[in-house]
Amino acid sequence: MRAPAPVDAMSAAWEHFLERNWLTLHGVIVVLGLVVYVMASRALYQRRHPSAAIAWVVMLTLLPYVALPLYFMFGSRKLPLAQRRSLASATVVRSSGPDDLAAWSRRLAGAMGLANATSYERLRIHRDGHEALEALRELIDGATETLDLCTFVFASDTLGRDIAERLMRRANEGVRVRVLLDGFGVWLGGHFDLAMLRSAGIEVVKFVPALKSAVRGLNLRNHRKMLIADGARFWTGGRNLARQAQQRFELDWAYAALRPAERGAAVTVPIDWRDEPPYAQLIPSGPDQIDDTVHALLVSCAFMARQRILMVTPYFVPDQTLTMALTLAARRGVAVDLVLPAKSNHRLADMARYRPLRDLARAGARIWRTPYMLHAKAVVLDDTVALAGSANLDARSLFLNYELMVAFYREDDVRAFATWIEGERAQAKPYRPSQPGLARDLAEGLVLWLAFQL
């Protein structure tokens, strides 16, 4: 009788070992996963919401073989602390102005290390997508030296090709054109032909290219949207504001191009409260900031508001803290109005929004639903602060994505934002909450569990 082959004997011995010790091995893997989670969270200074922390711990305990790879791909929420500090581009000069909501917002932004409020020449609020597109085309066609575009999606459609052709034409005319695209957004947009842009002399860089490096944060997407022409004109602001936006673009470009970010010259703009020039403040938010800046401003200003809070957003999936701040504002008599589309282009986000919407409605807030898709993002607090930019009122925008908002403090411009939101509200129908059935309630809860990924 022939002896078993060495390979067969080794396999049999390994199977026997696994049968007797699989619980021990499973325990070792669970402990290893939890140690990785704790050490990475401390080393990278990853502050998480308690529900998110509990979810990771439960998954790493019950399904470590699945959860550990997912954690490496999706678990990072902030860059390492040293790297975030290296991206700082401003030295803040704190003000001692009047204690109104605008002053509070400026001081809070300063405490979080953001650049000071600065002046701008002219604000133009685009009433709809067509007007915004025309302004974008004008800015591209009017540039003489440089064009720097940062966007999340560059779709392979008629609009994308139109913008690409304009950019390529300007590059051929001697304008330096740089395009910064999110790696995941390129995939969502249908894989636009970036080689065509590069062949025309356009510099193209993908921000955290998808599937390239889990360490750099596959789940951290650059959702910032801006176009800067000649370092002087910003798609949503004026001349001096564009200078700060240019610095923000340079930092993002250096990070995406895998070059060390250089510390720029400090931007110090002392504020003289004796006059009232127009002011705006760039509010970047994301993994490159120590704090969740946009979320902190929204929560703080909601607690400080005395008259009204106007909001417009395509997706409304706030965390419990922001929901509580808004509901408490409504209960103490602040007029809280939220305008959003009756049906957005994100089905799961639409399902997840109804629990916070019911909480707001019960507190006395008014919710308005437009019959069309509304992709604008803006918040007006009293008549003193307006926030506008790329951040949606959902957990992904407020805690994961790289976002860019602008805080406006000039009362005339704040009222202009309020007038625009009120115009959208006039075309909307009021939302009347109804108690969901058991199946619907369970479905909403399951979707909310994934709120950070919506």
Image: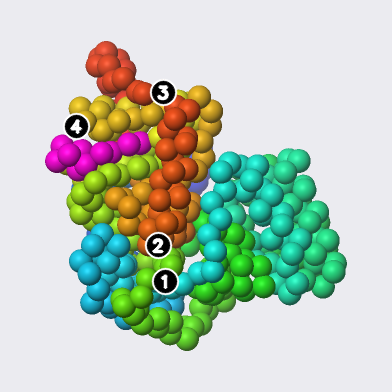
| Callout 2: SS | loop
What is the spatial separation of the Cα atoms under label 4 and label 2, in whole angstroms?
A: 30 Å
Q: Number of numbered discs present?
A: 4
The residue wearing badge 4 is 363
Q: Quadrant of residue 80?
A: bottom left
Q: Nearer the viewer, residue 279 or 297?
A: 279
Answer few, some or many: residues within 10 Å of disc 3's Cα (few below 14, many 20 plus, some between 14 and 19).
Answer: some
Residue that carries the numbered disc 2 in the rendered image: 410
Is residue 404 visible in this depiction of the protein?
yes
Which residue occupies 54% across, 51% down?
A: 125
Please state, as top left, top right, bottom left or bottom right, where the C terminus lies in the image.
top left
Whichever of labels 2 and 3 marks the residue nearer the N terminus, that label is: 2
Residue 58 or residue 382, whichever sits in front = 382
* Residue ID for mark 1: 277
For the point 71% across and 57% down, the residue is 138
Q: Are marks 4 and 1 in contact (CB under 8 Å)?
A: no
2 or 3: mark nearer the eye:
2
- Label 1, label 3: how many angstroms apart (C-alpha)? 38 Å
Q: Is residue 12 magenta?
A: no
Marks 1/2: CA–CA distance? 8 Å
Name the residue beneath numbered marker 3.
429
Mark 4 or mark 2, whichever is nearer to me: 2
Give x and y (percent) for residue 198.
78, 63
**How far apart in space, not on screen, are marks 2 and 3 (Cα)?**
30 Å
Near-viewer residue (90 or 208):
90
Front position among marks 1 and 3? 1
Circle 1: is it few (<14), some (14-19), or many (20+) Cα within 10 Å?
some
Would residue 315 be seen by someone viewing this image from the given angle?
Answer: no
